Amino acid sequence: MTMIMKTMTVANLKAQFSEVLDAVRLGEEVVIEFGKMHEKVGVIVPYDKYYQAERQLGVLDKVASVEINDDFKMTDDELLGL
């Protein structure tokens, strides 16, 4: 199911802020546009969509596996993308 997000300018957001919050509470996402070019600058989403619980380790235990060859070398900085 594809959800169509409501899009509004900053001025409309200011004028209808309470109504927007009501819509967000009901699960709607709202894209905020800025300026004459209507540049999309942000999205207001329900908190439960934004907040993600910590990942549980081991959920693929005995379901998937990975092997790393003995000659595989990577520095800590490479691993972290530094």
Image (cartoon, helix red, strand yellow):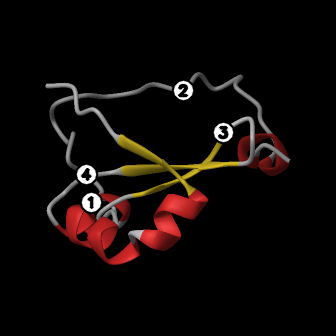
Q: Along the polypeptide, which appears first: circle 2 or circle 1?
A: 1
Dot 2 lies on which element? loop
Dot 4 lies on which element? loop
Identity of the residue drawn at 81% across and 40% down: 78
The quadrant in which residue 67 appears is top left
Identity of the residue drawn at 21% across and 26% down: 2
Kind of residue at badge 4: Gly
Query: Is residue 3 visible to the viewer in this orientation of the structure?
Result: yes
Q: Rounded to the nearest whole Å, what is the CA distance between mark 3 and mark 4?
A: 44 Å
Q: Is residue 45 left or right of residue 32?
A: left
Q: Is disc 2 in contact with disc 1, using a CB cutoff of under 8 Å?
A: no
Q: Position of residue 68 (x, y in %)?
A: 54, 26
Identity of the residue drawn at 20% across and 47% down: 59
Q: Along the polypeptide, which appears first: circle 1 or circle 3?
A: 3
The quadrant in which residue 40 appears is top right
- The circle drawn on residue 68 is 2
Q: Is residue 16 left or right of residue 3?
A: right
Dot 3 lies on which element? loop
Q: Is residue 57 left or right of residue 38?
A: left
Task: Out of 25 and 75, give the one closest to the viewer.
Answer: 25
